[in-house]
Every structure is written in C-alpha cells, then in structure tokens.
Amino acid sequence: MQTRRPILLILYAQVVIILVLYYLNPFGVGSLLTPKSKVLASPVATVSGIVRKLQIKDYYIALTVDAGRENVLVRIKGFPGIETTISAQSASTDLPGAPGGSLTRAYDLVGRTVTIRGEVSIPSARKNPGCFDYQLYLKGQGIYAIVDASIYHLEAGKIKYPLLHALSISKAKFYDAAKSLLGDEGFSITAGLMFGDKSYLDDDLYEQFQENGIAHVLAVSGLHVGLVYALIEKLFGGKKNYYTSALTIVFLYCYAALSSFSISVLRASFMILLRLIAFHTQRRYDLVCAASITAIIFLLINPYQLFDSGFQLSFVAAYTIGMAFPWAENKALFYSRKFRSEILYDVLSPVLPALCIHIGMAPLIAFHFLNYSFISIFINPIAIALASLLLPAGLLLYASCLVPIPIIQNLCSIPSLVLSRALNILNNLASRTHLSGSVCAPPFGLLIIFYVFFFYFLSETRYRLNRKNEEKSLATLAAALTISVLTLPFIFGITDSILPWSYSTPSLTFVDVGQGDCAHINIDGYNILIDGGGNYYKNIGKDTLKPYLLKNGIHSVDLAIVTHKDQDHSKGIYELADSFDVKEILLAGQDNDDCAITGINIDGIKVIFMADATKQRELSLLEEIPSLHADIIKLGHHGSKSSSDPQFISSLNPKFALISCGLNNSYHHPSDSVVELLQNLGIIYGRTDFDGAISLIKVTDDYALLRNAAKDKYWLIPKDK
C-alpha cells in the first residue's frame, strides 16, 4: 500500500462518533434540530415558506416547503393524473408569470413563497417490524410535519430564489419536450438517469431494473456526479484555477438542484469541493478521508440522515471504491508480474474492482431492497457504460430544450432515444436469465460484522501489521472489533439480540395491512398466516406482506388460513402466493356467518382470532364452550358494533384486545361503543391504525410483553398462574 492513512482507525472512529452524536447527543444536536413549530400545535394550520423541492405523484404534487426552522411536506391534492391535477390547481391559484403547459405551471412553484392552509399530521412511524419507517425517512430530510391541502388553499407569491426557480422551469420545459420526443419509456428512463426522478417510471419497469441490480443508474449517485464533473473538466479543457473551480461549484449546485438535492448528489458534490480545496491549498486528496469528513459534517447538520438508505449506500459505495480499487489494482499488478503477463493485468484490472464493488454493495442492497442479482456482476459494466453515454446525451437534449427550435431538438433527441432503448434492451435480456430474485434481508448484526471485517481486510492497518508479522496485534485488533460489533448495536438498541445472526422474529405479530386482518405466527420455524388483508387499489401481498416476511428472515409460509372470502381478509394471501412461497392455503369459510374462529396457546398465553364473527356467532360459540377463555383477543370485524357482544367479551375476560383496522377508514372502525365497552371492562387494547403492527415479544412465568413496530409503545399483561 502506498497511502499513509490509518484507514481502519478513521472508519472505526467515525462509527463511534456517529453513534455518540445520535444516541448520547452530548452537544444537543438533536434538540437544535427539533422544531419548535406552530404547525404541529393544531390539526389545521397555515404554512408560509419557500418551496425548495417538488415531486409529481399520481394523485397529488408534493412540495418541500422551507418554513423557517423546519421543512414541511405539503401534499396538494387533485384529480388522478398529473396533467389534470396541475391544470385544476393552476386554475385556482395565482402563479405570477407562469408559462403555459401543465408541468411548467407545477414547477413554477419552486423557489417561490407560498401560503398553504391544510390538515396537519405527524408522519407515520414504522408500521411493521423491520419495514420502512416513513417518519425516520422524512426526519432525515428535516421534515417533521405533513400538511394535506386542497388545490383551493394554495397561494403562490414572489420568487425568492431566482436561480432555483429558473432551473425548475427549465426542467419542466425539458420534461415537456422529452416526453414527446422520446416516448413514455425513453423519457422515463432518461429522466430517471439524469435527475433520479422515478415519478414517470412504470412500476414494473423499475422493479425489473431493481431485480437485475442496475437500478442505481436510475438513482442519481456519485457515478452521475462524477460524469458531470468529468464533462465540466472537458468543457474547461482540463484547466484548474480559481475561476474554473468557482464555475465548477456553480454547475454542481445546478445539477444538485435539478436532482432535488438528493443525499448521494450532495455527498459527491461536497467531496469534489474538498478535492478542489485540496488542489488549491496543495494538499493531497484522499477519497476515504474526504468521505469521512463529509459524513461527519452531514450528520452534524442532521443526525437522522444516518438511517437514510441513500446515505448509507452512497457512503458505503465511496468507501468501497476508495479501498477496494487500490487493493484490486495491486492484486492485478502482482499476479501479472508473477506470471509475467501484461494480458493478465489487462483482464484482471477491470474485473477485480467490479467484483469488489459487487461484494461490497450486495449485502446492503439486499438489506434495503430484499434483492440479490448474480447477473449484475456481468451487466453492470455495460449498464454503466450506457449510462455514461446517456447522461451527456440527455444533457445535450436538455440544453436544446432551452432554445425551442424543433429541428435542433429532434436531432439532439436521437442519441438519448437510441441509448435509452439500448439500456432497456439490456434490462430485458438480463431478466430472461432468471439470475436475480428476492432474498431475506441479512440480520442487522451480521451486516455490521460483514462491513467491519470487509473494510478491515482492505485496510492498511491489517496490511502493515501483517507485513511486520505482528500476529498478536492482529489478533487483539480482530478481537476488539468482534466484541464491539457484537455489543454496540445491542447496547444502543439497534438490535434485540446480541447474536448477530438472529432475526428475533416474535412468536406472534398482528401485521398492519391497513383496513383488514392479518396475523403471523412463528413458532419453532413454522410460519402460519391467519388472513392477509386486501385492498382494491393496492397489492397488499406484494407491497406489504412480502417485504415484512423477508425483512424478518421468513423465506416461506407453511400455512395460510383464509378465515372467509371477504377481500380484506383473503386478497392479500392470494397476491402473496403469486410472488412468494406459500406452501398451503386453507380457505376455512365463505362469509361472516361461517368465518373461521381460530386460537393458539403460546407459552401459556391463550390467543383467539375472531375474524369477522358476528355477535350471534360469538354467543353461539359461548354456548358451545362455556368455559372459553383468552388472554389476548383479536376483536371481530375490526371493532365494528356488529361484533364484540358485551356478554361474550365479559365471559372471555381477555387481558388485551387487538383492533385491526385502517387509519381514517371509511367504515369508521372501530365503533365508539366497542371502545367504550373495553374501557368499562378495564381491558387494555391496541389498534393497528394508531400503533401499527403489534407483536408478542416476551412471555415469562409472570407476564407477557407486547410491543408495536415503532418500539414506542409497550403493553404488559399478567399471566395466569
């Protein structure tokens, strides 16, 4: 190794600093970031601020509004389809000087002051164990509140940030032109690759890119920023002075703004800034040290970024490149000299770095996206080559759209059209190999161990100690690392078990599937689902159940019991079976009158699942089994007044009642009378609409402990002797 950085110590110190900053918070960083906001003080509020970002959704536009001490996510509701939405919105709001065209009218809001009145809510925390935490994700962007407003309660004011506004308008013009020039598919791929905008990508197409392991080309990252930086250097003819450096920073800011200031773009841009500073101060630039400085600065600004998948992937990629590339190059050079073959070096030099990147990124990608692609090793070099050509081609088309001359736009669109089609063809060919698929997320503790020892293996520290035959020092260092990675995640509450390979999957979880029922029983590795929810507008099986199971290390379901045919109980099971290993499905009933009532005894805790049983069915069951008792009851029909007969509940004498229902559901479940009944009987209850999934996490001789997915609510119930 020719570098002189104590790389292992840098990384290790950085991890400790990050944990201390976030958990122990010695400098009060978190309290500085906690908004003292009037927005959260009432359910309806008026928000005034400047629009920083805009995203186009199917049924609304999402604005990130800088409201002073905090950012607020504002969702402007409209009609299905962006053209209809923005047309309706622009007709009812004053957008001074807004040019024509639906997209242009929407993007005209960026950089302007706005005043919006709407309903305020706190973002929902993690709804199911191990799954996506929307609240934590928004906190990583400095957003603590959501405001839902109608199209009639938005007033647009003056332009406060002219450059940001002009860039947004130019982006809209580019989108309007590119959509007609490239077609829907070509436009969506180009927009995704250039600016990381996946709003226009077909869900199936993007999922295909993810499965093949090349979705990173559609999420703006350090690769894209590096290509833009290379283009800027070409533009300046390789000259480096204060003037070209200042222009480089301006260009990178513009690209970051067009890419909605994504974390990966900001990370790469800041590292380029450090590189320019190193050049002008005549200091050596080191990629890993620059990444470490950048990470610590970003986390000082907002520690919640630590939990953002984009942040993690971006910095792991930077560290892998900074450490694996030199190692791979040295190995290629060593073996080419050993066998006296220059051809061997030419073959190994591009393969080893690609293999290192694949090994370095695969575990984290599997953890976040539940996918592993073997074919990506072979197609990523081609995908990156196409991306490196499509990005400048897209920027050329972007520049041509600023000068609306049709013939120039048509000519400039040809390279983008050809390259986007080539990228899509590559994606389709990769899918036909069937060398990609869903995998269980690796346990968090195991993930930490992998990365500590992966970077340890590539570090100069190990290299130097090994070269000096310091076996004792190597053993001591390895032992210290092992103890640290085993204990720190457990001590800081990141994992529930000190065993890094353990998933700690509860024996019983009432899964949050929205307005519906689903319970997961996991005993001795045998997995049972009782119902699976279901929604007419959503694929609950694919989008909710499958991620929940894979995140918790479940690769197959042994038995799925469908209590009856109602959509909110059955549809999710059949959807899950389309893309997951469900070994047996048992349809136990047809309707509410004969739905299956099931029960289980878990370490002495009796649980009964009432499905959608009516009061009449409950009383009939009581007549059949007068001594029926349960410690935990899943109330019938989502807490509807048609179920939960007072006599039945009183006789059953449960200590905890679970109400499975969707937030703000149109059926107004649970019924006020049922909630009042539970309160009068002194029965503790939990609700999936408010609490998310609820799990039975511990049973002792004296009590049972339940916890919600966000780990901010606990229920302790006594156990009968």
Image: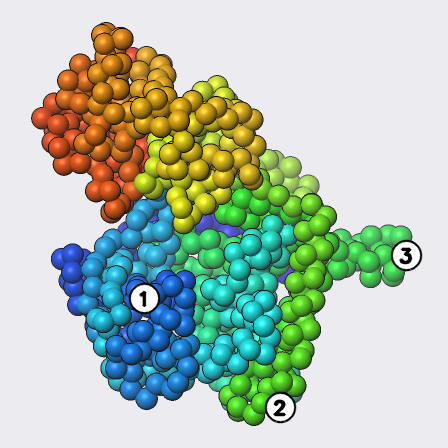
Note whether 165 is above or below 49 in the view shown: below
Q: Position of residue 116 (x, y in %)?
A: 22, 70
Count of marks placed on residues: 3
Note whether 234 is above or below 361 in the view shown: below
Dot 3 or dot 1: first in sequence order is: 1
Q: Amino acid at mark 1?
A: Gly
Note whether 68 is above or below 652 in the view shown: below
Residue at image location 59% in from the left, 63% down from the top: 217
Mark linked to residue 340: 3
Q: Can you say which quadrant of the picture contains the C terminus?
A: top left
Q: Amino acid at mark 3?
A: Arg
Q: Position of residue 135 (x, y in %)?
A: 32, 51
Q: Amino acid at mark 2?
A: Ile
Give the residue at the far right of this rendering. Answer: 340
Mark 1 neighbour class, 10 Å CA radius: few under 14, some 14 to 19, many 20 or more? many
CB under 8 Å between discs 3 and 2? no
Mark linked to residue 407: 2
